[in-house]
Image (cartoon, grey):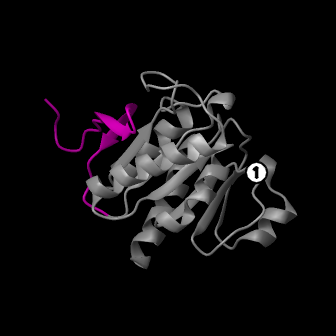
Amino acid sequence: MVAKGQFLERPTLIPLGTHVLEGLSHRGTRRPGLLVLSPTPEEGGGMDHVLGAELAWAAAHAGFPTLRFNWSGVGGSQGTRGGFESLVREARAAIDLAHDNGGAPPLVASIGGSCRVAMSVLGDVAGVCLVSPTEIEEWGSKVWVVVPQSDLSQRLEVATGHLHVIPGADRTFQKNLPLVGRAVVECLNAAETLE
């Protein structure tokens, strides 16, 4: 039995053609929901990535529904690992489910290399929150960025006004990990007021 206020994610299957992706979701009453894109499989990403789990916990604790999943060929997700276009298809399938479950397009929080995938689906979602982005050249008004202090650069400061810097942190976020979750909740709060 789950007591009021406890964090309980439920196993979730995301249909993708003839396959399914393994996911975990949490119900919430606020909108938009949060879809977490873990780092790419090449980076060792999956739904159990510590940073992705922290983002899901923080969002759920703030009342937002969440969804995180394993890419094809990772964990219990069926299929084989594919390239960039496959990752975009998988993200779109997860967006569809998150939208259906939450009643509104989700905000996508992506980590590392999956930030490029998030930018590819920007038109389909409430916004994106890029955590430690790599290879991102264009920014928009629906884009928030969360970076460790060690990655702060002049380019990021100029590129977006929606910048959260995690003090004393590096790319592993072993220091100040809860601050990353709080920053993503701030992105959700901002996206909520835009609806």
| Residue sitting at the far right | 154
| Residue sitting at the far left | 1
How many other residues sit within 10 Å of disc 1, few (<14), some (14-19) or many (≥20)?
A: some
Residue under the point 64% across and 50% down: 115
Where the N terminus falls, by quadrant?
Answer: top left
Res. 112 in view: no
Where the C terminus falls, by quadrant?
Answer: bottom left
Closer to the camera, 28 or 20?
Answer: 20
The span picked out in magenta is: 1-30
Q: Position of residue 173 (x, y in %)?
A: 65, 39
Q: Position of residue 132 (x, y in %)?
A: 69, 48
Closer to the camera, 22 or 152?
Answer: 22
Residue 153: quarter of image: bottom right
On screen, residue 131 versus residue 7, left or right, reads right
Q: Position of residue 35 (x, y in %)?
A: 44, 50
Residue 113: quarter of image: top right
Residue under the point 75% across and 57% down: 136
Residue under the point 61% across and 75% down: 141
Res. 36 in view: yes
Mark 1: secondary structure:
helix
| Residue sitting at the far top | 75
Please count the marks in the image.
1
Residue 26 belongs to magenta span: yes
Residue under the point 71% across and 71% down: 160
Residue 47 belongs to magenta span: no
On screen, residue 78 versus residue 146, left or right, reads left
Amino acid type at circle 1 is Gln
Query: Which residue is labeled 1 in the image?
Result: 149
